Image (spheres, grey):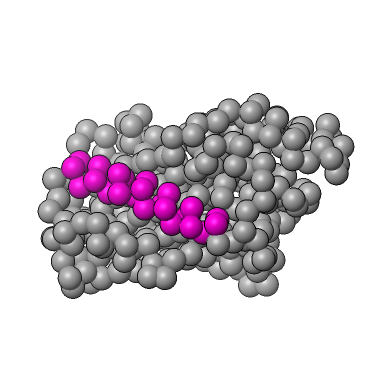
Amino acid sequence: MVSINGLSSVFPENKVFQEDVKDLGRKLFSSKIDFRKMEKVYDNSGVKTRYLSENLSWYLNEHNWSERNYLFKKNALFLLKKAIKETISKTNTIPEKIGGIVLVNSTGISTPSIDAEIFNLFDFNNEIIRLPIFGYGCAGGVLGLNRAVEIFKSLRKSILVCNVELCSLTFRPQIFSKENIVSTALFGDGCVSYLVEEGGSCEILKSKEYTWKNSLSLMGWGVEDDGLSVVFDKVIPEFITKKLPCVLSNFSLKNLNGYVLHSGGKRIIEAYKKILNNNKTIQESEKILSDYGNVSSVSVLLVLMEMIKKKYSGTFLMSALGPGFTAGLSGVKINSND
């Protein structure tokens, strides 16, 4: 039985409210556009609070790619160190016994990769397998898990999985596109860590990855002189409504009790509601969106944590979507009595 154990989350200290971020948006964008027309983007986002890597004043100024990426690496390592310590403590794990590290992110780059940095912070074995994963975006919460399960089945040793996303560091105040404005209303920062290993109360039953042809333009990053620019097409909710049901129907799970869904945004969640008959478990995705915003690959794991905390029990389909355009699926069985 392959399971998730020691699931832990850590966030930056800067907790902000949506009204404060809307005021920031007004300062940033009012000189070029009629911001009154954009206020509904903030009001209807489904986000009430979230955590940002820097103080709000930092986002008022332009920053180059070098500065953004320096802050990504610095903050990512700070958060991950705390999360990994918590995971190790919860599971009473000896770091030297861990067989692999899977590091998932899409919001900053580092060579040597962040997992190599992590390796030097703990007493890991020198023969540990490292797998840095970049570019899955929001789908990385599920697909990073799936890759870790595959490595575990080969090694039969505990695999440490870390997801860290600092989406706010990509905000570009001099860009007045609707996509950039939406990103200021939606995204937050944070990280999670956990072990994939034998035994536990959250069992992984099966997994799947599905990528649609000719869908590259739906979601991703543009690379600019001053950093990464967000790309997401307004047709994504419609695409999900039309294309995802067939994929889900071919991922059969017996005695399905509900869903663990990436909290990608209000319109994404509404699309899920439409195709899943407004299943009651979707309310947990809404809660995570409200409390943390969209934290890319971290978000679906926060939803799973919330459901474990609330003692959901049974079989659930875990799903997240990301650039490619790709769906990551996992079947998980939660036993709240363990």
Residue 258, above or below 106: above
Q: Which residue is drawn at 55% across and 55% down?
A: 68
- In screen coordinates, is 245 left or right of 310? right
- Quarter assignment of residue 274: top right
- In screen coordinates, is 255 left or right of 210? left
Residue sitting nearer the eye, 178 or 236: 178
Residue sitting nearer the eye, 169 or 133: 169
Q: Which residue is drawn at 36% across and 48% down?
A: 78
Can residue 77 be seen here? The reply is yes
Residue sitting nearer the eye, 313 or 163: 163
Q: Residue at x 19, y 36 (%)?
A: 338
Quick check: is 263 in the magenta stretch? no
* Label tally: 0
Residue 122, above or below 31: below
- Quarter assignment of residue 216: bottom right
Magenta region, residue range: 67-90
| Quadrant of the snapshot with the N terminus | bottom left
Can residue 320 be seen here? The reply is no
Residue sitting nearer the eye, 223 or 297: 223
What's the magenta bit mostly, secondary-structure-wise? Answer: helix
| Residue 114 image position (x, y, % from top left) | 37, 62
- Quarter assignment of residue 151: bottom left
| Residue 203 image position (x, y, % from top left) | 27, 50
Quick check: is 71 in the magenta stretch? yes
| Residue 11 image position (x, y, % from top left) | 42, 39
- In screen coordinates, is 5 left or right of 206? left
Residue 47, above or below 60: above
